[in-house]
Amino acid sequence: MKNQIFAILGSLVTLFLIACSGGVKKELPPVDISKLSENQPEVHGTLVEDKDITLANPLNQDWVKGGQNVYDLKCLACHKLTDERLVGPGWAGITKKRQPAWIINMITNVDMMLEKDEEAQKLLEQCLVRMPNQNISSEEARQVLEFMRKNDGEQ
Amino acid sequence: MKQITLKLPVAIILIGFFAAVGCKPKGMQTAVQGDAAVKAYVAPGKYDEFYNFVSGGFSGQMSVYGLPSGRLFRVIPVFSVDPEKGYGYSEETKPMLNTSHGFVPWDDLHHPALSTKDGIHDGRWAFGNANNTPRIARLDLKTFRTVEIIEIPNSGGNHSSPFITENTEYVVAGTRFSVPMGDKVDVPIESYKENFRGTVSFISVDPNNGNMNIAFQLMLPGVNFDLARAGKGKSHGWFFFSCYNSEQANTLLEVNASQKDKDFIMAVNWKKAEEYVKSGKGTKKTVRYAHNVYNEETHMATSEIKTEVLVLDPKELPDMVYFMPCPKSPHGCDTDPTGEYIVGSGKLAAVIPVFSFTKIQAAIEQKNFDGEFEGIPVLKYDAVLHGEVQKPGLGPLHTEFDDKGNAYTSFFVSSEIVKWRVSDLTVLDRVPTYYSIGHLCVPGGPTKKPWGKYVIAYNKITKDRYLPTGPELTQSAQLYSIDGDKMKLLLDFPTIGEPHYAEAIPAELIKPNSTKIYKLEENKNPYAALGEKNARVERKGNEVHVYMTSIRSHFVPDNIEGVKVGDVVYFHVTNLEQDWDVPHGFAVKGANNAELLIMPGETQTLMWKPERVGVFPMYCTDFCSALHQEMQGYVRVSPAGSNVPLTFSTGAKKANPAQ
């Protein structure tokens, strides 16, 4: 019992000394909350602008075919080729409704779009499922756009 | 009188026990310094500096922690099934646990070993040993998955393993239990000295893909091989194994294997062994062992039973194996970063002997022998000794090293870590551990380039350190800083299973290479449904194959009819996601195995044998999106002989063209 009392007293004295020396506070680095998630950036495609994309007719049929392959593997699960919504909006008419850069950015840069683009945010509110990053390259995305144009009746 | 003599040993044990309890370190209050919290604190969202790969002991798994925070990141299934991840339950992973004894769903993993190049961590693979049914596993540090398991023939328990050579040329496997081998195995246990043999296996590792192959085995006298370390630098080409029970006892080893003052550390010149192998000196022996490989492209494991192993006998092939006397049942056998010093830790010894590689070479040169043990030369103790650390503590077990010429030895009985200088064997510092430390780990401690900073104690007893949880308490580790003159306790953290050995490696050597997804374009699983267009159900006799896809948040197909009692249903589920950290799960009611957890782009298969008529729900087990609860479906099971056609659908129903 006596030993315990000494032990408790001892620890109190230790705590007191630490508190008095201010050693704890001095070594605490200031925490900047805004920086806490900085070391984990998701890697996305670079932002594409309309001037980066050239549309031409007749359609590039190789791209149409490549785009359809990507669609079958990675997009079809959620997007129909009609205007019917499945998980995401149907694709019919999309190339008339959206700018080419908007479409490419939704495919390759979806997290940035959901963070900054009002139209993208509206779609999320409707569909309630975040469009997934399907690991599609810029070249593949351009082919998907060509496939969408074909779907919208372009030749 | 007879009664008294019988009771005396009991009394000694009791006194010893009380003495040990009495040795319980005092002054816990002062063991933790005021700035400990800051040093072990990793702010939310920040990364740890080191990965810590910790053996799971009798859980059979390997766990991954961050240091200095002690946060648990992952439990990697290795030798035990893991229903959470479907490991050992999915058709693709079942072959990983195949052995010559059939499917073995559990083991006891004691020692991780991280691959090295030029004696320095390269962050490619981790190896682990199965202590019970002798095996070695290789884990890929890109995926944090077990990708290969090789069984060790002619072994009775793979404890002295899987330590590695400087360039990961070999991992070794020394048997703890010597056993009878070959044609004559049905022998009296008492005939140990006559019939029992020990082996040490050298398993080569392909530098390109890591694939393991048993290059050769050494046929050795019947003793217990305990731990081992490769030489490095100047001693590269040599391997050192501690062994006990040179008494060759087969019963009550606690007493009978503790009779002699000295057992051995065995020095193996493996470059010499390679020469013998090249010149055809080995003998091929018929054995049976499994070799299981997981293919990252097909996402499938295959198991092959092999029937031959090459054996070298040091009694016939000289200049390859030597014994060095080492006090009192040596356990740890550790080489320092320069490769010059080999530290033996006799569990019952009052000193720590340190051997000199230079002196070992001179003694061999001068044939400075102290007789033979079972036909193998024994080097003279004094001739190979660098010196002894005097009065270091009680019950030395293991030694790790820092980058400043210091060694850190764990002491089980006196429950402490003792820091000493390798050059002059001076004790520099000691700290208590809570309680009864086994292994310890300095990041990079067994390599040529220790990363230093911390030593971690892996304790055998936790007692009063955590809130009680019934008779079984959490296992635990303790983190100490070693960057100053004095070791300082920073943190306690709980661990899974029983932690034996562990290694720690800078995060930067692993983090940049971490796999995020399996690319659908590279998925070569023959049962993959690459895109929903390929989702389908096919019948082959009484087998029903469901080629299913999953994406946030639906399965295709999610309505299946035409399955009958007596069928065997295979759900081949392909996760169509291509985004990091989006696995989907799959479970079906009444399945006698487990769930599947399918990584993005991966295909995994669950076998299901419906045994009653009804409609059985299935669903995604891993919360994937706001509509995760909607990610579900039904399988209708009809009686055997029913004529319900096989159909499948998601949304609008369509007929199966195959029918």
Image: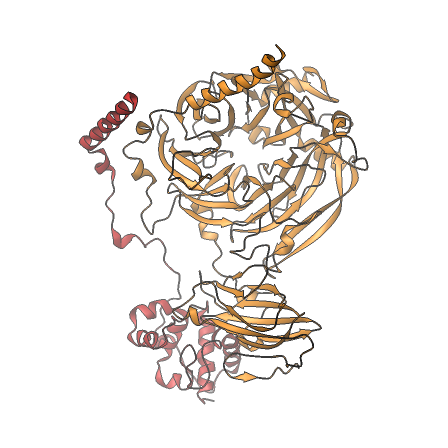
Q: Position of residue B200 (x, y in %)?
A: 68, 34
Foreground: B563 or B240? B563
- The single residue placed furthest to the left in the displayed view is A20
- Tally of marks: 0
- Tell me which residue sits at (48%, 76%) in the image: A77
- Tell me which residue sits at (68%, 14%) in the image: B370
Can residue B239 be seen? no
Q: Position of residue B352 (x, y in %)?
A: 52, 20
The answer to whether B249 is drawn above or below residue B186 in the figure is above
Q: Quadrant of residue B167?
A: top right
Q: Quadrant of residue A82?
A: bottom left
Quarter of the picture holding the N terminus of chain A = top left
Q: Position of residue B645 (x, y in %)?
A: 64, 81
Foreground: B409 or B268? B409
The answer to whether A91 is drawn above or below residue B126 in the figure is below
Q: Position of residue B651 (x, y in %)?
A: 49, 81
The answer to whether B121 is drawn above or below residue A45 in the figure is above
Foreground: B630 or A136? B630
Which chain did the image draw in orange?
Answer: B
The answer to whether A81 is drawn above or below residue B580 in the figure is below
Which chain did the image draw in red?
Answer: A
* Position of residue A63 in the picture relative to residue B536 (left or right): left
* Position of residue A37 in the picture relative to residue B439 (left or right): left
